[in-house]
Amino acid sequence: MGDQPQPMRAIAAGVILAVENGQSLSQCLPPALNRLAVHERAELQALCFGTCRWFHRLDAELSGRLKKPLRKPDRIVHHLMLVALFQLRFSQQATYAVLNETVEACRALGKPHLTGLVNGVLRAAEREGAPEPGDDAARFSHSHWMVEKLRHNWPEDWQRILEANNTQAPMTLRVNALRFARDEYLALLAEAGIDASATPFAPFGIQLARPVPVDHLPWFADGAVSVQDEAAQLSTTLMDLAPGQRVLDACAAPGGKTCAILEACAGLAEVVAIDESADRLPRVQENLERLDLSATLKQADAAATDTWWDGDPFDRILLDVPCSASGVIRRHPDIKMLRRESDVTPLAAVQLGLLDALWAILKPGGRLVYATCSVFPQENHRIIQRFRKGQTDAVLVEPQAQWGRDMGAGRQLLPDPDSHDGFFYAVLEKPEP
């Protein structure tokens, strides 16, 4: 291969292989993008996201077309063919270009002995068209366990959830209320020729008709708006923020909700933002700086309060817990490949542990908002039910909300193809003695 730059499809195949081996797209895609010219990067990103989104369907088709699986050293060629199949089935790319360039990419990967196989399989796929999916996992392009869990948890809605997960999420903005009213910013977008509308539930939200690069957004670099899904924006509407409060954002990275808290209420005494990840905390600082906001940042395990807490209790706590992220698959299609059924029970234990630990540092009269980007009840209202069995002083507050479904212990939003992600919220208050 020498010093020749690799073709885009070869790079994409390497990214999909890395995801199959356990890396997230956010880990393995940025270095891959840096290997390409700036004008080629959007295409590579679309190839990788699309192949992950349709991986289970494409993989079922490809496996049916291969007489036997490729040997492990040649596994990258399997992923190269998946990328090509994605283009044949879901893109407008000319067929001859997909076939010819995939064969060239196979050579560039140092696998010339497999070019005949690649050519034959893809020509047959093009000639015969897509087969009828053999089961729901292939039809909806999700792992078997996830299809079955959703079918069990949401017997009336599971197909809609799976279909929503396969759509491309809209681009949604949160207007910085310290700088602009939402109507003012909608007017600026209209002047810039960007078609947009107000979100129905989040008071500072704007949904764009089509995504645009952030540097096309008026005053973005000066902190006028942030990119944040409508469901995530609802956290501040539940916190009942007021000047003088001390607020904790636990599990804060990359900082969207930290910034939203500061924008939603001028005059808070202090906002403490904690995250366990040293790699992700700088993102929180970058977001704060762009928006000209300040918070106290700490790298720590939020549950280990003895390692970071100064003894001064909090008036408000936002606990956006680590979760399966099953509600944001449309934004992160690699979750379909990365998440295992065996992940959910340990995550539930972490969630309950965080609730227990942080409840102890909430001031009497204070409020804790529990949030996940999950659609699995095991991580959501069932956690709240389990927590309240052990914490008799936790009072459940039912939000007066027009969004989501009342689950008896919190509200659940399911992913909506035309608007918000899947999210869960519960509001708990600690009574005064």
Image (cartoon, rainbow, N blue to C red):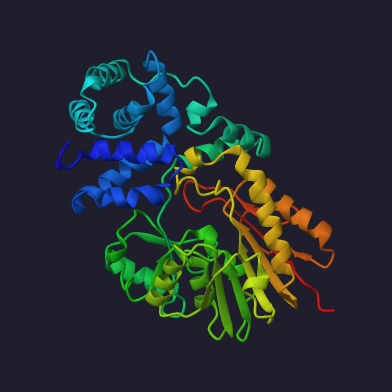
Q: How many marks?
A: 0
Quadrant location of the N terminus?
top left
* Quarter assignment of residue 425: bottom right
Horizontally, residue 334 falls left or right of residue 161, namely left
Residue at image location 83% in from the left, 68% down from the top: 393
Looking at the image, residue 47 sits to the left or right of residue 411; the answer is: left
Q: Is residue 366 above or below residue 424?
A: below
Q: Is residue 402 visible?
A: no
Q: Position of residue 346 (x, y in %)?
A: 65, 47
Residue 147 can be seen, yes or no: yes
Q: Residue at x 15, y 43 (%)?
A: 3
Task: Pick out the residue farthest to the top.
Answer: 67
x%, y% of residue 381? 71, 52
Which quadrant, please, contains the C terminus?
Answer: bottom right
Pinpoint residue 401: horizontal percent, then vertical percent. Answer: 65, 62
As rendered, which of 231 and 332 lies closer to the eye?
332
Task: Measuring from the top left, give residue 17's x and y in whole percent.
Answer: 38, 36
Q: Quadrant of residue 284?
A: bottom left
What's the residue at 54%, 41% (across, down)? 339
Using the rendered view, name the quadrant where residue 343 is placed: top right
- Tell me which residue sits at (71%, 74%) in the image: 361
Q: Is residue 323 above or below residue 260?
A: above
